Image: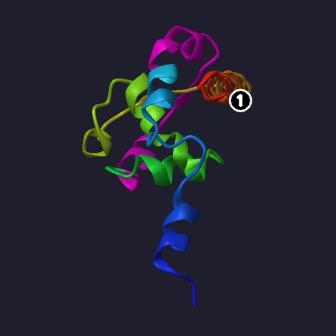
């Protein structure tokens, strides 16, 4: 039987916003993320099906649900409660996210080596 902490850790992805340094990195690079973003057109049926459930919508499009907070922020939706009647959604390019994440991990390693 798995421990609760193991189950919780399975739900955490590298994109989660639990680390304030990562959140700051994402916020500081908004224009970089938007420049490579793809616009997803959300049909009326999808809007009804996924109302308040942006994570499920992203999963249905093959995207990591861990990106939810980034996509909510990029699109200035506010929260999952505001994922209602959203006809278009900007989704950042995975290569740009990978590049940004690599910069983040490098910066964190350098900071640790300095101390």
Residue 76, percent from left and from top: 33, 24
Quadrant housing residue 84: top left
* Residue at screen point 54% across, 49% down: 65
Q: Nearer the viewer, residue 70 or 40?
A: 70
Asked which colour scheme the image uses, the reply is rainbow
What residue occupies the far front of the structure in this picture? 115
Residue 82, percent from left and from top: 26, 39
Quadrant housing residue 37: top right
For the question of whether residue 38 can be seen, the reply is yes
Report whether 102 appears left or right of 32.
right
Quadrant of the frame with the N terminus: bottom right
Q: Circle 1 — which element?
A: helix
Q: In the picture shown, does residue 11 fall above or below 48?
A: below
The number of callouts visible is: 1
Residue that numbered label 1 is attached to? 98
Quadrant housing residue 74: top left
For the question of whether residue 89 can be seen, the reply is no
What residue occupies the far bottom of the structure in this picture? 1
> Is residue 100 in the magenta section?
no
Residue segment shown in magenta: 27-50
Quadrant of the frame with the C terminus: top right
* Residue at screen point 52% across, 81% down: 3
Q: Nearer the viewer, residue 54 or 42?
A: 54
Q: Nearer the viewer, residue 15 or 110?
A: 110
Residue 64, percent from left and from top: 60, 47
Q: In the picture shown, does residue 2 fall above or below 44?
A: below
Report whether 58 appears left or right of 79.
right
Disc 1 residue crowd, few under 14, some 14–19, many 20+, Cα 10 Å:
few
Residue 21, percent from left and from top: 48, 28
């Amino acid at each position: 039987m798995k421990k609760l902490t193991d189950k919780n850790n399975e739900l955490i992805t590298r994109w989660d916003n639990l680390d304030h340094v990562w959140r700051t990195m994402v916020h500081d690079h908004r224009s970089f993320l938007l420049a490579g973003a793809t616009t997803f057109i959300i049909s009326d049926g999808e809007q009804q099906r996924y109302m308040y459930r942006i994570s499920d919508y992203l999963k249905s499009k093959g995207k990591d649900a861990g990106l939810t907070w980034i996509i909510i922020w990029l699109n200035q939706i506010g929260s999952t409660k505001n994922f209602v009647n959203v006809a278009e959604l900007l989704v950042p390019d995975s290569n740009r996210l990978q590049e940004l994440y690599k910069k983040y991990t490098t910066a964190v390693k350098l900071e640790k080596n300095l101390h």
